[in-house]
Image: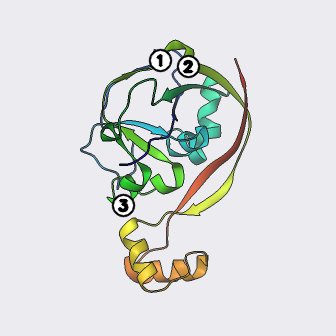
Amino acid sequence: MKKLPKKLYHVTLDMEHNGVFSPRVPLSRMKTEDAMTKRICVADSIEGCLTASPFGAHYLSESLLETNDCIKVFVIDTEKLGLTSAEVITPDELYQSGKVEDAYLTGEHWLLQDISIPAEDHSILKITGMDDEEWKLLIPYDIKVQLEADKVDLDDYEEVDEAYYRIVGEEVPNLCMIQDVTYVSI
């Protein structure tokens, strides 16, 4: 049985959001991302949320202009909400099934049931700094398995890019990772 993290996070630019969520298929998602499963997208860190969100990654600085550098953060206490492993899809499951190609990088989880997050678990944070300069290779699971079978060194960018091009016919995509977010509570 899979073990759930004690805390997960959801972030939004909607400062008025009341913390009541129902699973849905997001309108903004990666073109290769699952378009059928209704879910609430969360991650195991604020940085993971900011990397995975439609307004995040390399769009984040521009998006924050709309909110004076503020985000609303919801802390999902899995124990307090009584979430079970049957109601959560983990990053490994999302990545290996091909539902979300970057889940292994962002720590994205999917919640499959309605949740209501208590007001004491909402906060507004003003982002005072972050590092968004790290780019990671975004390799779909099935291609990663093939690269590993071909004994490609996954830490060697040039070797991965060359092998990926042989398989897919294009350069390996990259993901801009948000890291080291600093903030103050408002």
Q: Nearer the viewer, mark 2 or mark 1?
A: 2
- The quadrant in which residue 38 appears is top left
Question: Badge 3, how many Cα within 10 Å: few under 14, some, many 20+?
Answer: some
**Residue 175 pos. (x, y %):** 55, 57
At mark 3, the secondary structure is helix
**Spatial separation of the CA atoms under disc 2 and disc 3:** 31 Å
What residue appears at the point 62 percent right and 37 percent down from the top-left corner?
Answer: 62
What residue appears at the point 62 percent right and 60 percent down from the top-left corner?
Answer: 135
Residue 119 vs residue 32, the one in the foreground: 119
Determine whether label 3 and label 1 are within 8 Å by CB.
no
User: Which residue, given by chain and number where applicable, does mark 3 sit on?
Assistant: 96
Total marks placed: 3
Classify 163 as above or below 45: below
At mark 2, the secondary structure is strand
Q: Amino acid at mark 1?
A: His
Mark toward the start of the polypeptide (3 vs 1): 1
Classify 2 as above or below 63: below
**Spatial separation of the CA atoms under disc 3 and disc 1:** 32 Å
Residue 151 vs residue 157, the one in the foreground: 151
Q: Amino acid at mark 3?
A: Gln
Mark toward the start of the polypeptide (2 vs 1): 1
Farthest residue, direction bottom: 150
Give the label on residue 17, or none.
1
**Residue 131 pos. (x, y %):** 72, 47
